[in-house]
Amino acid sequence: MTVDKSESRVRRMFGEISARYDFMNHLLSGGTDVYWRWRAVRLARPTGAAPVLDVCTGTGDLALAYWRASGRRVSVVGSDFTHEMLALARAKWLRVRGVANPEQMQFVEADTQHLPFGDDQFQIVSVAFGLRNVTRTSVGLSEMTRVCQPGGKVVVLEFSTPTNRLFRAIYLWYFRNVLPRIGQVLMRNQQAAYNYLPQSVSEFPQGDALADLMRQAGLHNVLWKPLTFGIATIYLGEKP
């Protein structure tokens, strides 16, 4: 059965788990999610003065990572269509910005399939663990490419399935049987978010399949780098 990725279901689900979303990410990944974001930023660092856009930003961790990587000079926009997540992202920004210009970080409520930005605006358009939640992956990628500047980069950080046979078997057993139970106990929600997670990962295109979708969206020089035995993968494409 195909996983339900309708906009209404995804919005409700992330709204329900928003309060402990960061805690669960760090717990279930053993803190590795921080390293994965660091690798993504390192692969595509901000240069110059053009802004950065992080879609499906959630609580804003990748958006903040890009702001820090720019030497706290580049403006960053985080977009998400879940109001509760954006409220947490804005609160996080207030805690960390220090003496920085408040306008350097903005959070906008928006669906990645309908981004409210003009063409060719951002030097980097990124997404971390959110593209598989977009109802129409190809539409989301096309919108990310549209708002990216010519010569700019589109960065996708997403869960993937390990290729090593033994590790893959152990990982999938944990991912499908243990993780959902832990998640549901600690994060009780009506949308079964931690059953949705392994289902959405298993159905999401990976490797060449996702790279092909990025090329179809108008990107070139597409490459990908598996992380932590293939549990996650960074995809990078350039806009001509």
Image (cartoon, grey):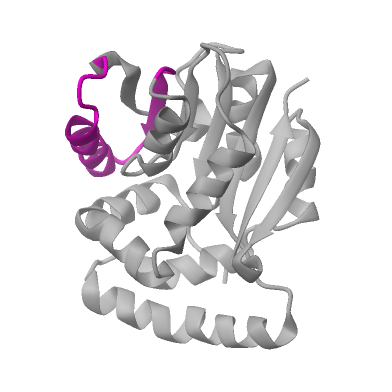
For the question of whether residue 35 can be seen, the reply is yes
Q: Nearer the viewer, residue 216 or 77?
A: 77
**Relative to residue 6, is residue 220 depicted above or below?**
above
**Relative to residue 116, is residue 234 depicted above or below?**
below
- Picture quadrant of residue 21: bottom left
Which residue occupies 22% across, 38% down?
92
- Picture quadrant of residue 119: top right
Which residue occupies 39% across, 64% down?
31
Please report the bounds of the magenta region as a residue range.
73-101
Residue 42 position in % (x across, y down)? 58, 40
Q: Quadrant of the N terminus?
A: bottom right
The outermost residue toward the front is 71
In the visual, does 184 lie left or right of 117? left
Q: Which of 34 and 179 is in front in this view?
A: 34
Q: In which quarter of the image is the C terminus?
A: top right
Residue 193 position in % (x across, y down)? 36, 65
- Picture quadrant of residue 149: top right
Residue 114 position in % (x across, y down)? 49, 27
Which residue occupies 39% across, 30% down?
78
Q: Nearer the viewer, residue 2 or 129?
A: 129
Q: Does the magenta stretch include residue 162?
A: no
In the visual, does 105 lie left or right of 213? left
How many discs mark residues in the rendered view? 0
Which residue occupies 55% across, 52% down?
132
Q: Does the magenta stretch include residue 91?
A: yes
For the question of whether residue 129 can be seen, the reply is no
Residue 94 position in % (x across, y down)? 18, 30
**Relative to residue 16, is residue 95 depicted above or below?**
above
